[in-house]
Amino acid sequence: MTHTTVGSTVYYCPMHRSIRSDGPGYCPDCGMALQPKGARFGLLRHIFSNPMHVAVMIALMVAIMAVAMVW
């Protein structure tokens, strides 16, 4: 499971970086689902890719904190 081919997506185990595969599957050591390389901080990169995402996130956090303080 440690082989790769050029141009394909490489999947790896989040717990065991030495476990790699050419396709999705499960880690033979721990049973966790293999993730595509580069997906670790994908959501975080997406949120910070646009300033509007950050503004909406901050506005929602402030609104939730205000409601929690009043409640």
Image (cartoon, rainbow, N blue to C red):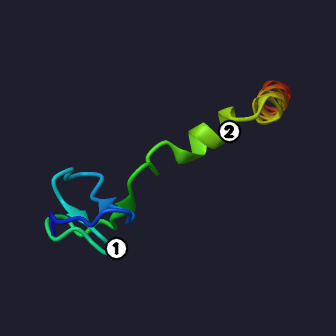
Q: Please state, as top left, top right, bottom left or bottom right, where the C terminus lies in the image.
A: top right
**Relative image position of residue 56 (x, y in whole percent):** 83, 34
Q: Residue under circle 2?
A: 47
Q: Amino acid at mark 2?
A: Ile
**Relative image position of residue 31 (x, y in whole percent):** 24, 70
Query: Which mark is drawn over residue 23?
Result: 1
The mark that comes first in sequence, 2 or 1, is 1
Which of 67 and 47 lies nearest the eye of the viewer? Answer: 47
Does residue 60 appear to the left or right of 13 in the view shown? Answer: right
Label 1 crowd (10 A; few <14 / some 14-19 / many >=20): some
Q: Amino acid at mark 1?
A: Gly
- Report the mark closest to the observer, 2 or 1: 1
Label 2 crowd (10 A; few <14 / some 14-19 / many >=20): some
Which of 47 and 20 lies nearest the eye of the viewer? Answer: 20
Q: Please state, as top left, top right, bottom left or bottom right, where the N terminus lies in the image.
A: bottom left
Q: Quadrant of residue 63?
A: top right
Q: Is residue 39 above or below residue 64?
A: below
- Dot 1 lies on which element? loop
Does residue 55 appear to the left or right of 12 in the view shown? Answer: right
Picture residue at 38% right of the left edge, 63% below the top: 7
Picture residue at 28% right of the left edge, 72% below the top: 26
